[in-house]
Amino acid sequence: PSKRILIRGGQVVNDDRAFLADVLVENGLIKEIGEQISISEDGQIEVIDATGKFVIPGGIDPHTHFQLPFMGTVSIDDFYIGTRAALAGGTTTIIDFVIPPKGQSLVEGYHQWRKWADEKVCCDYGLHIGVTWWSEQVKADMETLVRDHGVNSFKMFMAYKGSIQVTDSEMIGIMNTCREIGALAQVHAENGDIIDENQNRLIAAGVTGPEGHPQSRPEEVEHEATKRAIMLADQTNCPLYVVHVMSKQAAREISDARREGRVVFGETIAAALASNGSHYYDKCWRHAAAHVLSPPLRRDPTTAGALMDLLSNGDLQTTGTDHCTFNSEQKSMGKNDFRRIPNGINGVEERMPLIWEKGVRTGKLDVTQFVAVTSTNAAKLFNIYPKKGRIEVGSDADIVVWDPESCSTISAAQHHTAGDFNIFEGMTVHGGPAVVITKGVVAVRNGKVEAVKGSGRYLETNAYSPAVYGRINQRAKIHKWEKVERS
Ligand code: URP
Ligand code: ZN
Ligand code: ZN
Ligand code: ZN
């Protein structure tokens, strides 16, 4: 592969502006940006014509689950297939979740995931750590991970009762620790106790099919947990990032909190922006089960558009996928009981084209906003900016030459994941990556993926991201204790 690449004549787009320029890439980095960059034509350089196209920072998917041991099986896309699919869709960085079972050391879990990922990843990746239980040892592990292992985000599960769910009092301990060590607290916001109750009632009533999944987890279940997480984070002066926001109610809770000055961020996912919960009622079991994820897709057809509106006005900041694929055979584990259908859907490959289609083509997002919500905002929040998320001299050469005119129809027959179902099957998307460059190497060209197994690197992320902690101390003043001296 050529060590130097010149991208000629494209419209360079960052989150703050777009301008016509050439981009020169050398040794994995962006070396120069300017009009008509001149080069000696000595054959040592590859020239890519980007006329009529956008030159954007590679996508960052802050929410994937590759080869995740979960619900009695392991998600089918491993770190090779998963990152390869990511590249195929214009995403050059993923952030995955270490999810250690209760009782396991978080540091051990981290090393386990590194071992799985390092030899397989085709692009750079970071890790969030799931905190599934709480003890003095867990607290010490969180400190170690931030200090020595480049971790700066920890996810708590308010659902999945009996396996990885944490209690409010555990969340308080975890949030206090995040605050002390400069990390970002993340939550899966659903009330697991009421879900458990609803599930049992549905099963007792004979509702065993995939339609039982959304019925056991209605919007208010996500809404309540979102509101509670925001309150707990605010009371502990801990910044909060709500992962996979799936409903209007939860999203509005985040908007309101932000308007009150609280340090809360919201991520939604490709599936929520481009699909809906009607699929759970599909007559075909396989079809319905393929859409099972938590929180579920909503049946309210206005949800997707409303979530896109919130990305557009800045109330939600990032888009992930929650990519966690199980094939039909794995999904069949729940054939007689929806509670046993492994939770997870695809999206890592489709995210950027879908957001282009549903966001830019509808006029809700301009191209700079597209870059912000697919890449830059995540880079800032997880503190890998401007190494990632920006076309700038010195930044990593993770670049996508985006063709706004391309047109393709999503299909499991063509996708790069190992799953045998695609929840976006049959959708036509306009806009897609013509060329994808990861760390200065062309990984995708004309739809052909040339990803190199093991070529990606683990991304160390520093604590105290300015985008996250900038306002925390200001906010903390609100919670000063008051003491009255009395005679
Ligand atoms: O259904 C989902 N979301 N599966 C992956 C685990 C999680 O909760 O993120
Ligand atoms: Zn989750
Ligand atoms: Zn079907
Ligand atoms: Zn997830």
Image: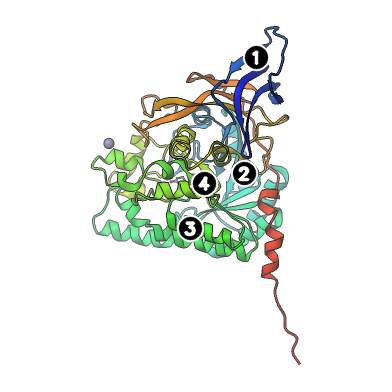
As displayed, is residue 180 above or below residue 23? below
Tell me the residue that label 4 is attached to. 312
Give the secondary structure at mark 2.
Answer: helix
Q: Looking at numbered disc 1 in the image, what kind of residue is underneath it?
A: Ser
Instruction: Looking at the picture, tell me which residue is in the foreground, 451 or 120.
Output: 451
Marks 3/1: CA–CA distance = 48 Å
Instruction: Looking at the picture, tell me which residue is in the foreground, 291 or 399.
Output: 399
Is 391 left or right of 300, judged from the image as shown?
right
Residue 324, picture quadrant: top left
Residue 384: % across, % down: 67, 39
Tell me the residue that label 1 is attached to. 2
Q: Are marks 3 and 1 in contact (CB under 8 Å)?
A: no
Marks 3/4: CA–CA distance = 14 Å
Sequence-first disc among 1 and 4: 1
Q: Are marks 2 and 1 in contact (CB under 8 Å)?
A: no
Sequence-first disc among 2 and 3: 2
Residue 158: % across, % down: 49, 57
Sequence-first disc among 2 and 1: 1
Q: Looking at numbered disc 3 in the image, what kind of residue is underneath it?
A: Arg
Marks 2/3: CA–CA distance = 37 Å
Instruction: Looking at the picture, tell me which residue is in the foreground, 426 or 487.
Output: 426
Q: Residue at x 59, y 58 (%)?
A: 134
Tell me the residue that label 2 is attached to. 108
Sequence-first disc among 3 and 1: 1
Q: Going by the picture, which residue comes out furthest to the top?
A: 42
Instruction: Looking at the picture, tell me which residue is in the foreground, 126 or 57.
Output: 57
Q: Residue at x 42, y 62 (%)?
A: 193
